[in-house]
Image (cartoon, helix red, strand yellow):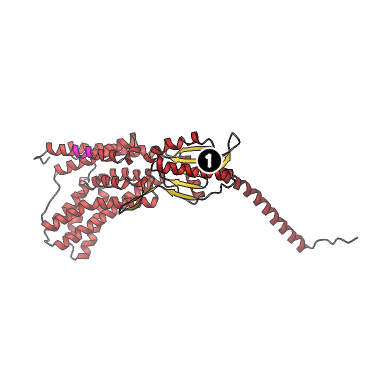
Amino acid sequence: MPILKPFSRQEFSDMKTSLARVLFAVAMLFWLLPLAAQSDELWVKPGPDGRMHVQLYFFWSATCPHCLEARPFIEAMPASRPWLTLHSLELTRHPEHTRQYEKMAAQLGQEAASVPALLFCGEMHVGWHNAETTGAEMLRRLDACHAGALAGNAAPTSNLVAEKLSVPILGEVNLQHFSLPLLTIAIAGLDAFNPCAFFVLLFLLSLLVHQKSKKRMLAIGGIFVLFSGLMYFAFMAAWLSLFQLLGNLAWVTLAAGVLAVFVGAVNIKDFFAFEKGLSLSIPESRKPDIYRRARAIISADNLPAMVIATIFLAIAANFYELLCTAGFPMVYTRLLTLSGVSPAGRYIYLGLYNLIYVIPLVLIVLAFVRSMGARKLTEREGRLLKLLSGAMMLELGVLLLAAPERLNNLPVAFGLLGVAVALTWIAAQLTKGKNA
């Protein structure tokens, strides 16, 4: 009979290490197996009838017109396909659905940036055209997913598909975002007629006229417009960051709507009682500082000093103009966060908005350079600009409160613009020949 030798200390230590590794491997196996099963059940799992049911996750927003158009078709899918289990998840009223969307998209290596979104069998489909195109394609993919599940092959494919259309010159355009550039032009075009910005620029250019140098006027005016645009972009980016942080919560849209109605009402009041009582204009107490900074540009000894003084004037003037300009940037950036545009795309739209915003300022500079004549904004012109922006702001605010999903509807948006322009034209005719 062999004699059993006791383990040495080193052998006992090695055995403990090996045993620990084996136990760790077994524990990991038991931990990973349920996760794998859970991942499979996310897309396909047995239903009440004992058959395999495909799980369809429909993420949508009550403020998204494409979602509202897609919703009846998608929610009717289970009627023709009993093996389909639909999870209809609205985001704006249910923050937990937003978190679920972000988590599921991340599992597929995607970003939860747009709605409507359909997730099934490891695929993520974003956007909606119509039932004949997008709807038919989704049904085809769901049928293929179900067939794969019956065959025991329902592995995730981690695909992302966005509905696109080929447009001449522009190339492929995401249909969900196609109307947004036109809406950007409409809102930015209105915002561009900003009496506060006009006041500062006209005063500066009127001082430069006395120097009788077109090149200097063009350089200083151009620098002022450039830095005004950059400051405005930074201001709008701050609004956008705030709304992105708060997410698609309904109360955020409600608060933006209330503030827009308030700003619009105050601006309309300014048409009838200009700068009396509460007014969203450059405060009289701040105008002497603007005058001082503008005169410092004229008295500068050399061009570099004039350029630096102009930059500081543009920065200071834009801070003073915040009350004048708060409304449209707030409404527009909230619209961006509700539209489903990707985070990077939102900043491209901000760039487009600000490009349009500075166009009237550029035209003013060019007109001054050409004529070398002094000009200032009259009280009547300021009141009419206040009425135009106030009417549009009031309409946008009411729409944010009552039907935010309509903001992406171009006929509605341009209808609001038409009403605001018509009211301002009528007011201009009634006040013709009057300066106050």
Image-based side of 283 in relation to 78, left or right: left
Residue at numbered disc 1: 55
Residue 242, image x, y percentages: 38, 46
Residue 304, image x, y percentages: 22, 65
From the viewer's side, name the closer residue of 79 and 35. Answer: 79
From the viewer's side, name the closer residue of 36 and 92. Answer: 36
Residue 18, image x, y percentages: 72, 58
Image-based side of 379 in relation to 60, left or right: left
Q: Which residues are magenta?
A: 418-423
Visible residue check, residue 52: yes
Q: Residue furthest right?
A: 1
Visible residue check, residue 263: no
Majority secondary structure of the magenta segment?
Answer: helix
**Within 10 Å of the Cα at label 1, are there few (<14), some (14-19), or many (20+) other Cα atoms?**
many
Identified at 79% across, 63% down, the residue is 8
Image-based side of 164 in relation to 27, left or right: left
Q: Quadrant of residue 340?
A: top left
Identified at 33% across, 35% down, the residue is 401
- Does the segment drawn in magenta span residue 420? yes
Residue 358, image x, y percentages: 24, 52
At label 1, the amino acid type is Gln
Q: Secondary structure at mark 1?
A: strand
From the viewer's side, name the closer residue of 58 and 433. Answer: 58
